[in-house]
Image (spheres, rainbow, N blue to C red):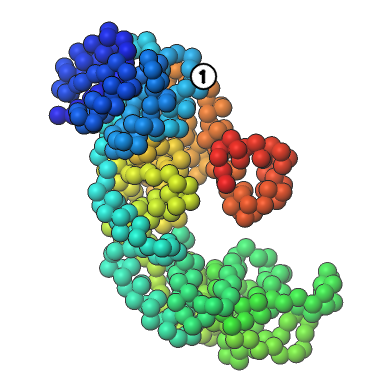
Amino acid sequence: MNRILVIDDEESVCWAFRDLLQEEGFEVEDASSAEEGLEKAAAFEPDLIILDVRLPGMDGISALPLFRERFPDCPVIVITAHGTTQTAIEAIRLGAVDYLLKPIEDIETVLKVIHKGLKHVRHDEEVEKYYRELSHRAHLEVMVGCSPAMQEVFKQIGAVSRGDVTVLLSGESGTGKELCARLIHNNSGRSGKPFVMVNCASLPETLLESELFGHEKGSFTGAFREKKGYFEIADGGTLFLDEIGDFPPLTQVKLLNFLETRTFERVGGTRPINVDVRVIAATNRNLLELVENGEFRKDLYYRLNVVEISLPPLRERKEDIPILTAYFLLNLERKTGKRVVVSSEAMEVLKRHDFPGNVRELRNAIERAWFLCEGDVILPEHLPPQVRSGKRGAALSVEGMVEGICESLYRPGETEDMYDRVMDTFEKPLIAWALRTTNGNQVQASRILGINRSTLRKLIVKYSLK
């Protein structure tokens, strides 16, 4: 039997809640002030607290942080009056899981909010176990997984890290090929030297050779000075060539020559340049099919594929979803200081989804839910629509994300400020992203966002961003 503590100075309100909730099978206690409520909560140990905002002595908003601090596992629902939207928003910001509006007339809405609040009690124990294990690690630039498939990947990473063998990483988009390459580099004898990543698909064919191998002054229109390429920049370290299947034929020849001789010439140059670079390549395409179709050189394929590490899709290792979820939540907590857990119901939804976008899609889903969850527990309704529906499709469409946000913020008959609420939801992560992208440079961040610096500073203060 769940225990509920009602804190309201109006006896009629306490009586109404007691009558309703006892009939629903709950054990109920009430208090007429925040101070009395804190004392009764310590003795009664409620599973849910209903807290009025307007109270004699300490008001509900002032008392809310005390309840969250002393009873962190007990969800709090606040009661506020019509027309006090800002108060409700402040209560959610301080950790309330939901709010009710006075006068309280719709019994079905009351019960729905209470049952929803009680879901916050049921945290997923498996995620919590992994969270505690991961929290002891000093840093989180790691791959996590407990499935047999990932254990095999970890063994292969350990084996290839001991030498300088060329490695080919294969797997669908979002499976973690870049992180795998970084781990190989960080655990190798080259860890103190550069790790240089090149996304071959993002570079135009006309620029790829110049970017990789550099060019001499005057070698083509616009080459006003000599330029080092990524091979020279990575000297002594590791060069990670992502999306290697998109290499054009002439660049394939030049890469093959480097792998065989460890030398190359800049574009427009005649002088051989020797560098000590380990090459790790990655692809989400079937290179053997490209070889058979004449799109990729067979001799280059075998030069790259000295050791192949195949990263499994998330749908084939769903037992890793809880530990990956714990990993993402702990990363978010270390960045922001906000502790969020996931409910058992939400975890069941995550396990049912196939995640065509793999680990990247799961990370996006957790980050989205983290921003949208009321209080500190992720519920199924905080997850993206395509995850809740179990449909396979695009990893995370903009339309789906906006739809999910609107669903979580809208309250029929009560919400009249949807535009402002949705904009506020997007604005904070947008500003945070711009600051992260520019390493905190406000001038660059304001230029990217297209706003002036004084506006950016106001938004940084508004959202308490560092």
Q: Position of residue 85 (x, y in %)?
A: 49, 20
| Residue 286 seen in the figure | no
Quadrant in the rendering for residue 38:
top left
Circle 1 packing at 10 Å, graded few (<14), some (14-19), many (20+), is: few
Q: Position of residue 235 (x, y in %)?
A: 62, 81
Q: Position of residue 311 (x, y in %)?
A: 39, 68
- Amino acid carrying label 1: it is Glu
The structure residue drawn at horizontal position 65% and vertical position 36%, both measured from the top left corner, is 458
Left or right? Give the position of 95 relative to 300: left
Left or right? Give the position of 112 relative to 266: left
Left or right? Give the position of 347 relative to 429: left
Residue nearest the viewer, comparing 180 with 47: 47
Quadrant in the rendering for residue 262:
bottom right
Q: Secondary structure at mark 1?
A: loop
Q: Which residue is mark 1?
A: 416
As drawn, 33 above or below 211 = above
The structure residue drawn at horizontal position 32% and vertical position 18%, both measured from the top left corner, is 33
Q: Position of residue 246 (x, y in %)?
A: 58, 69
The structure residue drawn at horizontal position 42% and vertical position 78%, both measured from the top left corner, is 308
As drawn, 39 above or below 265 = above
As drawn, 22 above or below 359 = above
Quadrant in the rendering for residue 324:
bottom left
| Viewport quadrant of the N terminus | top left
| Residue 12 seen in the figure | yes
Residue nearest the viewer, comparing 285 with 312: 312
Q: How many marks?
A: 1
* Farthest top residue in view: 12
